Amino acid sequence: MPFVDLLLIAVLSSHLIAMNVAAGGPLVGVWLEWKARGGREPLAAHAADELAKWSLLSLLGGVLLGVLLGALLWNDAYKQVWTVRLSHKAVWGLLELGCSL
């Protein structure tokens, strides 16, 4: 297996992990905030704040890894797919990223 394939595997798996943390972190954070309400679990509020920070950093890291992955895979056929066939998905993806931030 060439080095490039191993690099693609590592970048893709890191991207997927980062985006999963970015997507699931806020859901766990809401649960932690609920546990912290009323002073029942004082450590939960701190954990929710830390989780929010790490979720945001994970979102930004996942985006950068996704851009790196796209750059590694970029060729004429891939360019054709993203600039012609899936251009509307790229626009909506950028809008979704803005809303997530």
Image (tube, helix red, strand yellow):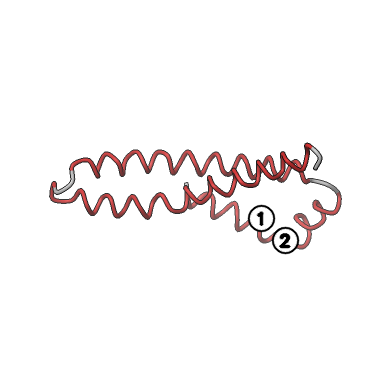
Q: Mark 2 points at which residue?
A: 86
Mark 1 lies on a secondary structure that is helix
Q: Residue at 72% across / 61% down in the picture? A: 86
Q: Residue at 34% across / 38% down in the picture? A: 50
Q: Residue 85: image x %, image y %?
A: 77, 63
Mark 2 lies on a secondary structure that is loop
Q: Residue furthest right?
A: 76
Q: Residues within 10 Å of mark 1 (few under 14, many from 20)?
A: few
Q: Residue at 77% across / 46% down in the picture? A: 73
Q: Residue at 72% across / 45% down in the picture? A: 70
Q: Residue 82: image x %, image y %?
A: 75, 55
Q: What residue type is labelled 2?
A: Leu
Mark drawn on residue 90:
1
Q: How crowded is mark 2: few (under 14 residues within 10 Å), some or many (20 or more)?
A: few
- The quadrant in which residue 96 appears is bottom right
Q: What residue type is labelled 1?
A: Ala
